[in-house]
Image: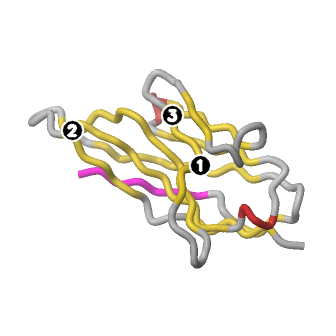
Amino acid sequence: QVQLVESGGGLVQPGGSLILSCVASTKNFRINHMGWYRQAPGNDRELVARITSAGGTNYADFAEGRFTISRDNAKNTMYLQMNNLKPEDTAVYSCNADVVSTFTFSRSVYWGQGTQVTVSS
């Protein structure tokens, strides 16, 4: 069983910063890559950033230069540092994890419940 719990969302003024966290409980699973996604009302869910188990990263164009994804494998925790936030960044931010069972070696993807980020003055 894998559980992902996000935290760190909230209300912030334009130009402000937030740090999101995603803690993974992964008994009997190994985590491969993890990612942050977001979904604004009326929009499809979109990738924000992804990070591999080795620390390789890739970002959506809107996130490049403003957001930083990182992970602490020892703590099974992933972070998203968001700077210079804009009103258009308002969305529910969710984390996901690509995992492999240590017993069956089957691969699965799990999602957290999401955390609301609102950028408004």
Decide whether residue 103 is among the magenta residues.
Answer: no
Where does the image place residue 9, in percent across and percent down from the top left? 66, 62
**Mark carried by residue 48:** 1
The vertical placement of 43 against 33, above or below, is: below
Identity, as a three-letter code, of the amino acid under mark 1: Val
Q: Secondary structure at mark 3?
A: strand
Marks 1 and 2: which is nearer the front?
1
- Range drawn in magenta: 1-7
| Residue at the spot of label 3 | 51
**Mark carried by residue 12:** none
Question: Is the C-beta separation of discs 1 and 2 under 8 Å?
Answer: no
Q: Secondary structure at mark 1?
A: strand
Q: Name the side, left or right, on which 63 lies relative to 25.
A: right
**Mark carried by residue 28:** 2
Q: Name the residue rendered at 53%, 49% in the picture.
A: 36
Mark 3 and mark 2 lie on one chain; the one further toward the N terminus is: 2
Q: CA distance from mark 3 to mark 1?
A: 11 Å
Mark 3, other Cα within 10 Å: few <14 / some 14–19 / many ≥20: many
**Residue 105 falls in image quadrant:** top left
Where does the image place residue 48, in percent across and percent down from the top left? 59, 49
Q: CA distance from mark 1 to mark 2?
A: 28 Å
Q: Name the residue rendered at 80%, 52% in the picture.
A: 17
**Residue 103 falls in image quadrant:** top left
Mark 2, other Cα within 10 Å: few <14 / some 14–19 / many ≥20: some
Identity, as a three-letter code, of the amino acid under mark 3: Ile
The vertical placement of 121 against 33, above or below, is: below
**Frontmost residue, 47 versus 14:** 47
